Image (tube, grey):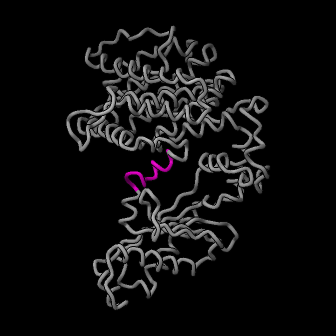
Amino acid sequence: MEENEPLPILPPALTAVSAQLRWPSVLGSADGSCDSFPLECLAVVAAVTTARDFLLLRLDAATVGAALLSEVINDRTPTWPATPMSDSFRMDVESILDQMRRMRALQACVPDLKDDFSALQVRGVLVAAIATPGPGGSAEPAGGTADPRALLVLLGSALTRLRAASLRSVAEQQALAIEAIQLYAPLAHAVGFGAAFSELETLAYRKLYPDSMRKLQSWYQQVWPDGDSVVRHLREALEAQLLEAPSLTGLLQSVEVTSRIKTVPSTFRKLLRSTPGEKNIDTVRDIMGLRVVLTPSPTAVEMLQNLLGRTVTAEEMEVLLCHASHRQIIRLWREESGRFKDFVTKPKPNGYQSIHTNLRLDDGRVVEVQIRTRGMHARAESGSASHEAYRAQQLGGGLALQPSAVQRTSLALRGVQKVARDASEPFTPVRVPLLKQASSTVVASMHDAPVNATASFEDESVLLDAEPTGAEQ
């Protein structure tokens, strides 16, 4: 960390917890460098980074404090600092940490987390352990007895371990990475916190498949260097085409076009889980995605009935609008043969509705487009049709076996955030003297220091059968 870089900020309730880290002694030499104790230094940096992430999630002080301490209490540091703090706060943090460690101990009962079914069992047990709201929001809790905050700290602890993994042995790094991919990343997505803990997957793949990840990153830089400007142009073109189309005049109240560029870990996961003949990067056709959400006008049903000369239901109106919009969109760019999927007329079993298709741009690159109405989008953002549920199943499947327990756990975790937000009060930031001059070794270890390629998790040639275009400099 540069000397003039802003230091981490903690609310007053965590000032005493930060003293737990015993900054000068853990950091080694008197000048604040990390050369004497690099592993301890890296653990401190990783712990504070995770605590910062928890603060951004607007979690309560006890949860943030537990996340801060979960991976740094060892034989070098006392159980608690001498700094005064309330007994209730201390007991709250200790309770969260104790429950978190009990939940982690469940993992030891499974001999091999690389087995999908075994990993699924552990995830199911962790979800079932959480005390959740009863059916219908009743006051009587369902599920287990564990504090929901312990699950969040468990996920944060896994992230802290991975962030500080680079100075561990190769075997330890790979074990932590397997835990993240098989257990913690799917669990985070299933309970609605996938985005908050997305770095779990990124760091894990870098540890297990460093060469393949570097090649894929290089391909991104060569094939999609202008991704941000391209999506802006595509959004504007789609909105203009739909809003100005004579056949849609008066039928649409608004058109919202959003976009995303698939992340490198997400693309890598898709390649990793694809069949052997589909591991070439050219088979991935949704690197860039556009979602069109249509809001029908209040008179759309009446207008269609007059136009068609028959009765039109609200559901049929939404289907007709999606197909009419699709016809307008393929006037802009050529549709890829065989890529049209109509989940509007024939919804998926979980109720998901949308039109999916691929379009080839003038420069030869391919984008995915999804078309749905506002009502379809609302249903896709909740319940079993949600993106989080899809991602959880995609990452390892199975949590759909306990949809009610997963949903209750997700609601319980959101409740933790709400309580913290409702109870929050303005505070004067307290700056924690993290590092004056961190060694380059530790700073580098927080980012792209991969496992030695000769000691990789497995032969990476199975991941990318053909070298992607531009993969090598």
Vertically, is 467 above or below 362? Answer: above
Q: Is 188 left, or right, of 382 in this rendering?
A: right
Residue 327 image point, x, y percent: 52, 80
Q: Is residue 242 above or below residue 140?
A: below
Horizontal side of residue 148 vs 171, given as left or right? left
Quadrant of residue 340 in the image?
bottom right
Residue 385 in magenta stretch: yes
Which residues fall within the magenta stretch?
381-392
Q: Residue at 79% of width from left, 49% of height from top?
A: 472
Q: Main secondary structure of the magenta part?
A: helix
State whether residue 237 is above or below residue 15: below
Report the residue at 30% width, 12% height from top. Answer: 84
Q: Nearer the viewer, residue 8 or 195?
A: 195
Asked if residue 441 shows in the view, the reply is: yes
Q: Is residue 197 left or right of residue 442?
A: left
Residue visible at 52% across and 21% down?
109
